[in-house]
Image (tube, rainbow, N blue to C red):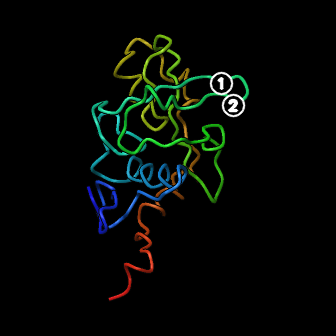
Amino acid sequence: MRHQSDELSCRRCSDTPISNMSGPELLRHMGSHILHDPQFKDADSPCGLCLSTGQLCKIHLIKRAKKGVQIDMVNSHCPNLKKILLAKASKFTKQSPCTNVPTQCPLCPKGSDAVWKYNLCAHIHKDHPSANVANYNNLYTILPEESTLMRGIYKRPPKLKKSETAT
């Protein structure tokens, strides 16, 4: 969805421009929808960057010797694809509570598409029904404080730029 001045906007809240959001800001915004927007309660694998469902987006990860695991920008596909420091983004802080990052499912073959953390439990249930999902709860469980802070982000009205507030 396009916003004034041809800026890309969130597909759920069209008054929220996302083109100039940093990676962590985009993760927080989209993650708040995934966790707290009723439309995504039973959605099929919503993308953590654009909210597309049904695995339309493909995120691949690569391991770099000195930089650790990163999004493979060449082989990943999403309209909102951004470089994100995954190690930093996966750490909960009160200022940046969203820990929804793409991760490699430990049950999928090497080289498979990454799965967003907030979708991992549902992914295991759906794609690996014989697996004991509890064995992997350390990979998808979020702190109650993360959920609370993300609910606050979801309920907070979007910040408009100064140019948008002038009438």
Residue linked to disc 2: 67
Say if 7 sits above or below 98 in the image.
below
The x, y position of residue 154, in whole percent, is: 42, 60
Number of marks present in the image shown? 2
Write down the quadrant of residue 165 in the picture: bottom left
Residue at (41%, 65%) from the top-left corner? 155
Q: Quadrant of the N terminus?
A: bottom left
Q: Residues within 10 Å of mark 2 (few under 14, many from 20)?
A: few
The x, y position of residue 129, in whole percent, is: 37, 15
The x, y position of residue 163, in whole percent, is: 40, 79
Rounded to the nearest whole Å, what is the CA distance between mark 1 and mark 2?
5 Å
Q: The disc labelled 1 sits on which kind of residue?
A: Arg
Residue at (48%, 15%) from the top-left corner? 111
Residue linked to disc 1: 64
Q: Are marks 1 and 2 in contact (CB under 8 Å)?
A: yes
Looking at the picture, tell me which residue is in the foreground, 18 or 35.
Answer: 18
Q: Quadrant of the C terminus?
A: bottom left
Q: The disc labelled 2 sits on which kind of residue?
A: Lys
